Image: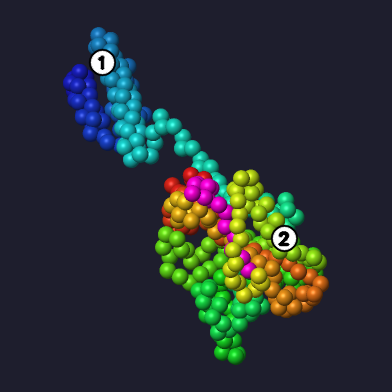
Amino acid sequence: MDIAKEIEELTNQALQEIAALGELKALEGWRVLYLGKKSQLTGLLRGLAQLPVEERRAAGALTNELKRLLESSLEEKRAALQSAQVAALQEQGRLDVTLPGRPLLQGRLHLTTQVVRQICDIFKSLGFQVVEGPEVEWDYYNFEALNIPKDHPARDMWDTFWVDYTNEQGQRPMLLRTHTSPMQIRVMEKTSPPVRVVVPGKVYRYEATDATHESMFYQIEGLAVDKGITFADLKGCLFEFARRLYGPDRKARFRCDYFPFVEPGVEMAIDCFACTGAGCRLCSNTGWIEILGAGMVHPDVLRRVNYDPEVYTGFAFGLGVERIPILRYGIEDIRLFYSNDLRFLKQF
Ligand code: PHE
């Protein structure tokens, strides 16, 4: 066969096949077939030596041209397939090397944690120690020991989640603590006076949630028992706390309130920091914002933990934590605290 013809046919066939290839993997097969040791091209190159001298030059030139053409087609196709592959990956969004890196999310303390720490720091500086206690609690600590016997109407003050456990007497003695006050008993049972502790922690109430009610929230309990502690100590301590938390100009007020485990009992309010007493939405036009319940520890409570009420006296207080940032930042729904919405949490 005429070499020029053979080369032309081979060229057509090779170019047609390579054009049809769609994958990088298939390219190697094409290379072996058209440029490999056993290819038709290699055969042609070897055969050149056998040709008569007059034909050799022209045939040699054609064959070499064919070789260059096949080699350059291979490289072009390889480059085209590679960039197609990169483009396909980019299309899937997997690889855009020009995109800036994603910044690492920086963690932060939960708003409640920040406020709990702030309050505990104030009481620490006033000589209190921070302790914690169980959230699943006995009826005895949550109610009985705090002068709230079974069937006492005062239990209605706390809607309770009972743990589904019945003892031999057919009673349900276990619950989720409804306040941090059971820790007053636990601390006094374990230590002898003087006692000065604050107890931050979660408490639970069995109630329908809405913008102002959550079934879980935080309280901080305080307890100080020693010889000679008076109501003036309670007042001095809590007024100082209010000034440190809300600024030196805050006024504070006590009014009588009832809690079975203190006598006398009070509720403490500060003058509204938004309207300084004139009356606004924050303080529901009263000029005052209630921030905690407190009182002198009831003698029966002291007796129950073997503290002699003739020798020792003390005060206790309990405050709701979320109320503080709610008022400070104007947060309109308490449910935002624990629904894990980062758009809310990241603001603090
Ligand atoms: N435990 C009370 C409550 O949850 C608050 C309180 C604590 C009142 C200590 C007086 C003394 O409502």
Q: Is mark 2 within 8 Å of ligand 1?
A: no
**Residue at coordinates 36% horizontally, 29% vertically from top-left?**
37
**Residue at coordinates 56% horizontally, 82% vertically from top-left?**
152
Q: Nearer the viewer, residue 308 or 78?
A: 308
Q: Is residue 211 visible?
A: yes
Are the two marked residues, 2 and 1, in contact with CB atoms closer than 8 angstroms?
Answer: no
Residue at which label 2 appears: 232
Does 35 sit left or right of 174 as displayed? left
Does 344 sit left or right of 169 as displayed? left
Q: Is residue 203 above or below residue 169?
A: above
Q: Is disc 2 surrounded by few (<14), some (14 to 19) or many (20+) residues within 10 Å?
A: few
Q: Is residue 318 above or below residue 58?
A: below
Q: Nearer the viewer, residue 296 or 251?
A: 251
* Residue 23 horizontal/vertical position (percent): 30, 37
Q: Quadrant of residue 265?
A: bottom right
Q: Is mark 1 within 8 Å of ligand 1?
A: no
Q: Is residue 74 visible?
A: no
State the extent of the magenta-drawn residues as a range.
265-278
Tell whether position 50 is magenta.
Answer: no
- Does dot 2 land on a helix, a strand or a loop? helix
Q: Is residue 50 above or below residue 100?
A: above
Tell whether position 273 is magenta.
Answer: yes
Q: CA distance from mark 2 to mark 1?
A: 113 Å
Residue at which label 1 appears: 62
Q: Amino acid at mark 2?
A: Ala
Q: Residue furthest bottom?
A: 169
Q: Amino acid at mark 1?
A: Leu
